[in-house]
């Protein structure tokens, strides 16, 4: 009997791990379960991946490598070509890696340690710089951060939309956002209307509505991350990246319906603490507790 090549075994382990992480969550999937799925011993899994964290890193690696190749190529282009190459390439890369990206969102705190986290943040900052362009002002840089998030978040939350449809929708939305040059002296109202007054309709996306009416409260399909880079932004927040301004005291702000549903799913699954849920959604712990309490007493209509 011929032994199975090591590379084939490793690939099988990664595929099985991704399937089980998607079904049960990273925290609730022991290595033993992966071994049983493949009819291997736990020792065979450990031979290829000494810890479960090594599995997670290996699953994320192709996404990070593709993003780095995209940015390496874009850095040699003129400013406008580089911007368009990053926007389109970022969407295409995220669509290619839809499943690992979904896992990243739901188990966001798991990669806030070590080299993977720092590498992801470097990638996000490079993308921001290329989209903003040289000598960009504050408002242009803010828009660049929002643009990266718009090219990431909808992929997780619109999993049933075909790639080609979602790609067109996302690029339409981000181009509306960047259509008018940003000037730091513009008013908030002016900046909101400058991106276009069109209302999103099907054939268009939620991103269009955000681009045309200004930032919306953070929902499942938001365009802004806690640190301003979509999934990378939420990882920065979970990992204690740059400190965020303290919120003023008072009644916690409301959550949207999709946020409420996401918070309850994470809480019921037992994979996230209240602190982690609050960080992921960009709200206070009090806000999370308020909606979880209302859920328990059936007072909140979702």
Image (spheres, rainbow, N blue to C red):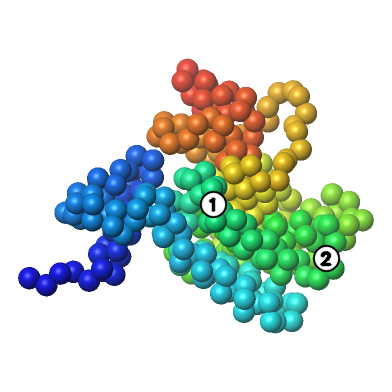
Local secondary structure at mark 1: helix
| Residue beneath the point at 71% across and 70% down | 130
Mark 2 in CB contact with mark 1 (< 8 angstroms): no
Q: CA distance from mark 2 to mark 1?
A: 31 Å
Viewer-closest of 129 and 144: 129
| Residue beneath the point at 59% across and 34% down | 278
User: What residue would you read off at disc 1?
Assistant: 114
Q: Residue furthest right?
A: 185
| Residue beneath the point at 46% across and 31% down | 267
Question: Which numbered disc, 2 or 1, marks the residue that appears first in the sequence?
Answer: 1
| Residue beneath the point at 62% across and 76% down | 72
Q: In the image, 161: left or right of 125?
A: left
Viewer-closest of 58 and 224: 58
User: What residue would you read off at disc 2?
Assistant: 136
Q: Position of residue 181 (x, y in %)?
A: 82, 66
Q: Residue furthest top?
A: 297
Marker disc for residue 275 = none
Q: In the image, 221: left or right of 185?
A: left
Q: Position of residue 55 (x, y in %)?
A: 38, 55
Q: Which mark lies nearer to you, 2 or 1?
A: 1
């Amino acid at each position: 009997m011929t032994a199975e090549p090591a590379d084939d075994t490793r690939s099988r382990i990664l595929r099985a791990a991704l399937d089980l992480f998607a079904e049960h969550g990273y925290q609730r999937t022991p290595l033993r379960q992966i071994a049983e799925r493949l009819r291997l011993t736990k020792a065979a899994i450990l031979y290829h991946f000494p810890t479960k964290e090594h599995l997670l890193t290996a699953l994320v690696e192709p996404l990070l490598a593709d993003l780095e190749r995209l940015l390496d190529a874009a850095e040699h282009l003129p400013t406008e070509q580089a911007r368009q190459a990053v926007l389109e390439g970022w969407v295409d890369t995220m669509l290619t890696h839809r499943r690992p990206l979904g896992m990243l969102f739901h188990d966001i705190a798991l990669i806030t340690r070590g080299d993977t986290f720092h590498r992801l943040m470097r990638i996000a900052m490079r993308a921001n710089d290329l989209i903003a362009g040289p000598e960009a002002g504050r408002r242009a840089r803010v828009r660049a951060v929002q643009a990266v998030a718009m090219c990431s978040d909808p992929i997780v939350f619109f999993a049933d939309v075909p790639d080609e449809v979602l790609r067109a929708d996302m690029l339409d939305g981000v181009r509306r956002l960047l259509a008018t040059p940003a000037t730091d002296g513009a008013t908030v109202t002016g900046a909101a209307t400058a991106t276009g007054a069109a209302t999103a309709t099907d054939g268009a996306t939620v991103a269009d509505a955000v681009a045309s009416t200004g930032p919306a409260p953070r929902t499942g399909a938001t365009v802004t991350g806690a640190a301003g880079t979509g999934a990378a932004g939420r990882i920065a927040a979970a990992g204690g990246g740059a400190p965020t301004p303290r919120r003023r005291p008072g009644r916690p702000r409301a959550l949207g319906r999709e946020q409420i549903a996401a918070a309850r799913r994470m809480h019921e699954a037992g994979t996230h603490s209240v602190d982690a849920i609050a960080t992921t959604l960009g709200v206070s712990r009090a806000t999370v507790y308020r909606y979880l309490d209302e859920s328990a007493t059936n007072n909140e209509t979702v």
